[in-house]
Amino acid sequence: MRNRRKRPVIKTHKKLSDMIADKKAGESSSLQTKSGSSVVGESNDEQQQVKVGELSPSLHINVDRIKKRLGNPTDLIIREFEFELEQKVTATLIFLEEMNDTQLLSEFILDPLMKLTSDKQSSPVPVEHALHYIKQNALALGRVLDVETEEEMLEALLAGLSVLLVEGNTKGLKMGTNGGKMRNIEEPTSEVVIRGPKEAFTESMKTNISLIRRKVRSPDLRIEKFVVGDITRTDLAIVYMDNIVNPLIVQEIKERIEQVKTDGLLETGQLEEFIQDETVTVFPQLMSTERPDVVIGNILEGRVGIIVNGTPFSLIAPTQFIQFFQSSEDYYMRYDISTFLRLLRFSVFIISLIAPSIYIALTTFHQAMIPTTLLFGLAAQREGVPFPAIAEAMVMEITFEILREAGIRMPRAVGVAVSIVGALVLGQAAVQAGLVSPAMVIVVGITAVASFAIPSFAVATSARLLRFPLMIISSVFGFYGITLALIVIVAHLTSLRSFGIPYLSPFAPIQTQDLKDSLFRFPVSHLFKRPENLAKKNPTRTLPYQVKKKREEETTR
């Protein structure tokens, strides 16, 4: 087979595929047998020159490949146009309609390129240099990168970028023209704001990162991105302060994220199950929030924020048990008020966990511990009830859980009313029918209200789950069973770790300095240090100061 000459530079606006077809048609028919095999060989050589996965210099071949890979979707827009360099050049702009800003595409890509003429060029630009010239002189966009393979082009299109291909070039350009409809920044829906910033994360990871950068104007803020999910290709990012965080914690989080192998990742709850330390537990090991100020406050203490594209909830790691009883408002109010509220939240957690169990144990085994007057009243109430206390409690608790779930699933306009009215009507009807005693209705009602006073929904759910086995244990063993069960729960909490950090710190192991910001919150002037296990690089939060003493000295002069 004869050697082929090097293909000359294209000097016309005719497509490369048309030139090859004309060349084949002009060959002599008398040499059909011999030269025909040569033509086939030449065609195979041309196909071999474009390796598998690389872009072809022919536009229609690249476009056909993209259509085939994407299934020729209706939202795939292919805009072919011409512009002038050394000669007229054909180009194609490819993008997904609903994921791009069409106004941005028209004003900053199509309009400048279609107005290109040879008069505006200091020297003629050959076709092979078209992409470099366009990138440097024609596109008024901040994010323009090269595309060399078909997979890179597909990934760019599915990520909401647009791709520009030029006839005769084996590369393309991917441009940041992301757009489409996005939810505006609103108030948090799952975390009520009493005092503090009234803004919440959205489903856009870029918007969430911008909310953090607006408040943390430090060059030490680090944002590292990952892609998880073989099918969904979900973007996520970790956010931390490089001058504060423990490098071992960051390395551990990175390794766990990189080891996640799944088809899709839709929400942070799925990621939490993949990267948490212990799976057999009812207690959350990562903190979830939709408030930027909560994430910022935690990364300033040496923790790491995890943001997932497509969900307004972000994760915070590592996490201690005491964090779930703290709120960002605690740092925006006086320390004495914050301390009272933290103690109240921890108290309502204990109430929601063991209040029904204590009532069952008292009425079943330990009647001597009840005051005589109250005991006579309880006995009179239970005189017509045919079921034991454990059966009453189970029926009422399950009924309330059904009403709570129904209130969540029903339309928001009627959900709250249905849950409240349903609880009142069913409770009153059950008492009148003699199925439960009024005292049991009161205990279950207090337990339900207490569970809503816990700031973290995850910890409140843990108390709801543990409440039922504790009720069963108390009905069999009384206070002895409750005591043993609580010891087992505390031992389990002590054994938990969150990315290597003890879950019950600063109580177990005890850390004196960190106790100043646990169940109690000392004044800000006494919170000099960051958590001991987290901030290894820079443990000092603020320097000691004495404003009051200086003012006293000034007033006595």
Image: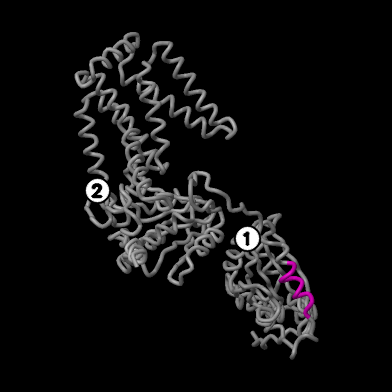
Question: Does the magenta segment cover residue 113?
Answer: yes
In the rendering, which numbered label is found on residue 495?
2
- The one of 523 and 78 positioned closer to us in this rendering: 523
Q: Position of residue 345 (x, y in %)?
A: 36, 40
Secondary element type, mark 2 = helix
- The one of 547 and 451 positioned closer to us in this rendering: 547
Q: Specify the principal SS of the magenta part.
A: helix
Q: Is residue 354 something one can see in this rendering?
A: yes
> How are the colours assigned in the image?
one colour
Quick one: label 2 or label 1, which is nearer the N terminus? 1
Quarter of the image for residue 537 reads bottom left
Residue extent of the magenta highlight = 106-116
Q: Position of residue 18 (x, y in %)?
A: 77, 75
State which quarter of the image contains the C terminus.
bottom left
Category of crowding for the residue at label 1, using alpha-carbon neighbours closer than 10 angstroms: few (below 14), some (14–19), many (at least 20)? few
In the rendering, which numbered label is found on residue 69?
1
In the rendering, which numbered label is found on residue 98?
none
Category of crowding for the residue at label 2, using alpha-carbon neighbours closer than 10 angstroms: few (below 14), some (14–19), many (at least 20)? few
Q: Position of residue 182 (x, y in %)?
A: 62, 54
Q: Amino acid at mark 1?
A: Arg
Secondary element type, mark 1 = helix
- The one of 206 and 380 positioned closer to us in this rendering: 380
Quarter of the image for residue 52 reads bottom right
**Outermost residue, top direction?**
384
Q: Is residue 168 left or right of residue 235?
A: right
Give the residue at x 23% y 24%. Answer: 476
